[in-house]
Amino acid sequence: MTEILHDPLLIWQAGFPALYALMIAIILRLNRRSERRSLHFSARMRLDEFLPFRPGLSPIYFSAYGLGVVAYLATFLRPELPRVVFGYLLVFLASALFFWFLPSRIARGDPSTSPLLRARWLGSFQRAAKPFNNFPSLHTAYCVFSTAVVLAEIPSPLGWWLLLWATLVILSTLLTKQHDFLDDCAGALIGVAAFLAVLR
């Protein structure tokens, strides 16, 4: 215990998983709050109507939960970790403000029309997280933030692979009809802004 108190980095290392879980819990709570609201903002454009529905891409969509924490893992032993954790908090706070003051709703596709097992995973997710608060996209915000951190702080080919991964995740959010184009644009801006605020 005294080791933790004398090493501030250990507090950030141990505290982030609890903070991340708390942020997810609050987001789900805000989702339920938005469900009770009568008015919702929609970011849908004509472009979104032309995109096909591909529920089979849900594994890529769900992989955002892994990519989203890569910045924490990449800086786990580095002095930048406290600033990275603060960046995660900035992404969460900026998104939560939108969810509170500008609740949004998205018209999702129906994954039960697909015979693929992985499409049923998307259906289970949709039952747990109702179609609210899609603007901005937290999936995109956390993935962009994580990728920017690794590209800037860990010079290696890993950052470019993460950039490809983040691009695929963003495309999957559109093709699984979990987000609209403007949701992803707003999420990417928040991710970049958080990165610039804490590491540049």
Image (spheres, helix red, strand yellow):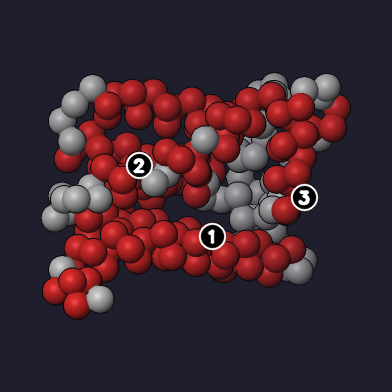
- In the displayed orientation, state which residue is furthest to the right: 113
Q: How far is the residue under mark 3 from the one under mark 2?
A: 27 Å
Q: How far is the residue under mark 1 from the one under mark 2?
A: 17 Å
**Where 158 sits versus 95, above or below?**
above
Q: Is residue 64 left or right of residue 49?
A: left
Q: Position of residue 18 (x, y in %)?
A: 44, 65
- Answer with mark 3 or mark 2, whichever residue precedes in sequence: 2
The nearer-to-camera label among 3 and 2 is 2
Asked if labels 2 and 3 touch by Cβ distance under 8 angstroms, the answer is: no
Residue at the image point whose x is 31% and y is 49% from the top: 72
**Depth order, front residue of 192/155:** 155
Q: Is residue 1 left or right of residue 36?
A: left
Q: For mark 2, does the 10 Å Cα neighbourhood hold few (<14), some (14 to 19), or many (20 or more) residues?
A: many
Q: Amino acid at mark 3?
A: Arg
Q: How far is the residue under mark 1 from the one under mark 3?
A: 16 Å
Q: Secondary structure at mark 2?
A: helix
Residue at the image point whose x is 64% and y is 40% from the top: 178
- Identify the residue position indicated by label 2 in the image: 70
Q: Secondary structure at mark 1?
A: helix
Query: Which of the 4 image quadrants contains residue 94?
Result: bottom left
Which mark, residue 127? Answer: 3
Q: Is residue 193 left or right of residue 124?
A: left
